[in-house]
Image (cartoon, coloured by chain):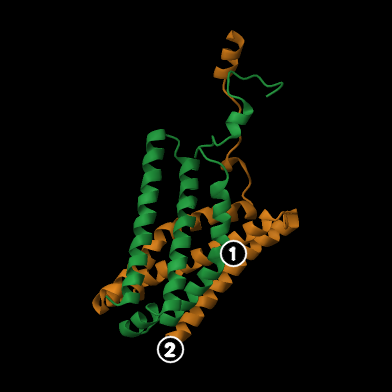
Amino acid sequence: MADFDAASTRARPLSPHLQIYRPMLTMMMSIVHRITGAALYFGTLLLAWWLIAAAAGPNAYANVEWFMGTLIGKLILFGYTWALIHHMLGGVRHLIWDTLHGLEPAEREMLALGTLVGSITLTVLVWVVGYLAMGGPR
Amino acid sequence: MIGQRSTELRTPMRRVRGLGPGHSGTTHFWHQRITSVAGIPLTIAMVVIIIALLGRTPATALQTLSSPVVAVIMLLFIINSAYHMWIGMQEIILDYVHDEGWKLLSLMANTFYVIAVAFASCFAILKMSFGV
């Protein structure tokens, strides 16, 4: 048993972590998927606040509308929109991978790029539609 | 474990039977997939609902939010998202929090937070729907 004890206390080789790899798009999209997920986790408070305010009455609702109208509010809301869409598209990508499709080098690069381009395009589109729904340029 | 030295008395079967950091198997993995598939149409519907409510008066917004179809879609979105984000945050905690005490506390905090946010949101929708 002495041999085994010596073996178990010796420093074990560890799997290398993120900082050792050259940053790649698929890797960045993987990290961003987790970050957007965590951001949405806390961003859900906005949804809860909005719903509670709508249920509470016109004054509370006006407060939410006021905050969302400020520059900070708009930035948070824009970030929330992008995180939501990016996380959704990233999820679709993972569901495709779950079926064992799109795992070839060129395919996974395309999917990663598609997630990013798609999320930015759709976020801008949603905001343009939202702007027009509010009455557009007045 | 043939050909590999180990001081462990546990068999490989014991190791794979639900003894990851979460002490459970692939249930959450699978549930995360189910809730992600359900989340796609629900998220799109939510974005449409919110755009439709932009710039409306509180009275009009209240009327829309309390209509049965909108209320049910929002309730489904919240319950589905709550479970999805509960699993997701648990996975993040298990990846980064290794101290048993902090792990236990953060897993509890995750559960409390998710239930509180989901319950508050659902309560608000139901209150509007039933017009109390």
Classify residue A108 by image quadrant.
bottom right
Image height of A75 relative to A103, above or below? below
Image height of A68 relative to B56, above or below? above
In this rendering, position of residue A76 left or right of residue A125:
left
Q: Is residue A58 visible?
A: yes
The answer for which chain carries disc 1 is A
> Which class describes the residues within 10 Å of circle 1: few (<14), some (14-19), or many (20+)?
many
Q: Is residue A65 visible?
A: no
Which chain, by letter, is green? B
Numbered marks: total: 2
Dot placed on the residue nearer the N-terminal end, 2 or 1? 1
Q: In what element is the residue under mark 1?
A: helix
Label 2 vs label 1: CA separation? 29 Å
- Report if the CB atoms under discs 2 and 1 are less than 8 Å apart: no
In this rendering, position of residue B2 left or right of residue B90:
right
Task: Point out which mark residue A89 bears.
Answer: 1
Q: Quadrant of the N terminus of chain B?
A: top right
In this rendering, position of residue B129 left or right of residue A107:
left
Q: Quadrant of the C terminus of chain B?
A: bottom left
Q: Amino acid at mark 2?
A: Gly
Q: Picture coordinates of residue A123 (x, y %)?
A: 53, 72
Which chain, by letter, is orange? A
Residue picked out by circle 2: A135
Q: Which residue extends farthest front? A: B130
Q: Nearer the viewer, mark 2 or mark 1?
A: 1
